[in-house]
């Protein structure tokens, strides 16, 4: 199945000219961004009783708009064009500073790394938040070899997230991506009474649980939102991995609300995808 026409700007060449790896990475990227936009409405807005299969309008937010999750991921992917992990980390920080005014909803660790104000209640979580994990989810997909993958992921995370908890959570996520296996994780009632927090360890648990129980992409996205809390992150990361694991599926392209995502916001996506393809092909 061909990607819908509204995704054509993100294709650097005809769909039939993409190899299987490129198609898999493209679907994972689009699933990530779409789930991010879908989950943004529910982010830290209580634990919803129901989640309809449609994009919802959020106050003070453009309809179908992405969050900082996708924006930061795009900047991270662009940095993969550099020749070394260290150069990529420096390039990401440079891009982050250049684009800070365009980013909505920056987390406390990223704000702290930029010298921006951090709320008093968020100070304790600085360094351990899930920003590094979410930024490198797609990065991990480009590296089949664990040693190489861990080196690049660690470098790209530690430029903002110094906590070993944040780093190890992302490294474990990368292992899960490529093993395509995980031990069944079930969330019990009351595990996240106020929703999934934006900390790395808890986000990893939520992602594992979603991947363990979900039977299709729609279920992944809506179940992430039903958990409440940091819904855009859990939905985006889980959806990207689910799509990576099911490259033969075209269910992403048939989501009824996919065209409602504000794809025009992803202006640097072609450059990010190109860097991701090249890195995966090395």
Image (cartoon, helix red, strand yellow):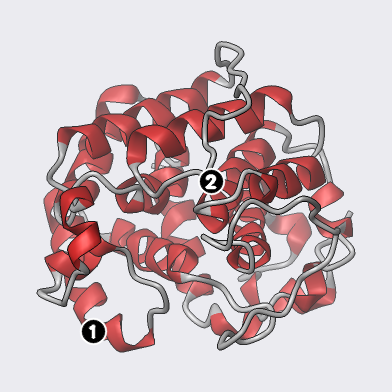
Disc on res. 43: none
Q: Residue furthest top?
A: 183
Relative height, residue 176 to residue 225 (above, below): above
Instruction: Please state the horizontal and vertical placement of residue 90, each as a whole percent of the image.
Output: 13, 63
Q: Is residue 270 left or right of residue 127?
A: right
Instruction: Please state the horizontal and vertical placement of residue 79, each as a whole percent of the image.
Output: 29, 62
* Residue at left offset 14%, top offset 55%: 159
**Residue 117 visible to the viewer:** yes
The secondary structure type at the circle numbered 1 is: helix
Residue that carries the numbered disc 1 in the rendered image: 98
Q: Is residue 113 left or right of residue 1?
A: left
Classify mark 2: residues with Cα within 10 Å, few (<14), some (14-19) or many (20+). Answer: many
* Residue at left offset 29%, top offset 48%: 129
Disc on res. 195: 2
Instruction: Please state the horizontal and vertical placement of residue 29, each as a whole percent of the image.
Output: 58, 56
Instruction: Please state the horizontal and vertical placement of residue 70, each as a whole percent of the image.
Output: 49, 65
Classify mark 1: residues with Cα within 10 Å, few (<14), some (14-19) or many (20+). Answer: few
* Residue at left offset 77%, top offset 43%: 217
* Residue at left offset 12%, top offset 51%: 86
The secondary structure type at the circle numbered 2 is: loop
């Amino acid at each position: 199945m061909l990607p819908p026409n509204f995704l054509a700007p993100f294709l650097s060449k005809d769909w039939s000219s993409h190899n299987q790896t490129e198609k898999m990475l493209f679907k994972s990227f689009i699933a990530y961004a779409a789930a991010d936009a879908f989950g943004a409405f529910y982010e830290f807005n209580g634990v919803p009783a129901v989640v309809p299969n449609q994009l919802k309008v959020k106050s003070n937010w453009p309809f179908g708009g992405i969050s900082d999750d996708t924006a930061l991921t795009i900047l991270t992917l662009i940095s993969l064009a550099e020749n070394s992990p260290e150069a990529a980390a420096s390039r990401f920080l440079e891009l982050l500073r250049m684009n800070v005014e365009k980013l909505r909803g920056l987390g406390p660790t990223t704000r702290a790394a930029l010298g921006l104000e951090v709320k008093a209640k968020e100070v304790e979580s600085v360094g351990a938040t899930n920003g590094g994990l979410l930024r490198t989810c797609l990065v991990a997909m480009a590296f089949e070899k664990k040693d190489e993958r861990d080196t690049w992921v660690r470098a790209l995370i530690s430029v903002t997230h110094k906590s070993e908890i944040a780093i190890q959570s992302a490294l474990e996520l990368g292992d899960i991506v490529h093993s395509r296996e995980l031990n069944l994780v079930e969330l019990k009632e009351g595990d996240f009474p106020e929703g999934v927090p934006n900390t790395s360890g808890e986000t990893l648990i939520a992602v594992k649980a979603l991947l363990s129980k979900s039977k299709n992409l729609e279920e992944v996205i809506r179940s992430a939102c039903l958990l409440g809390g940091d819904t855009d992150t859990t939905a985006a990361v889980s959806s990207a991995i689910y799509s990576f694991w099911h490259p033969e599926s075209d269910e992403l392209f048939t989501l009824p609300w996919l065209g409602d995502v504000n794809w025009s916001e992803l202006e640097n996506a072609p450059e990010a995808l190109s860097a991701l393809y090249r890195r995966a092909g090395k």
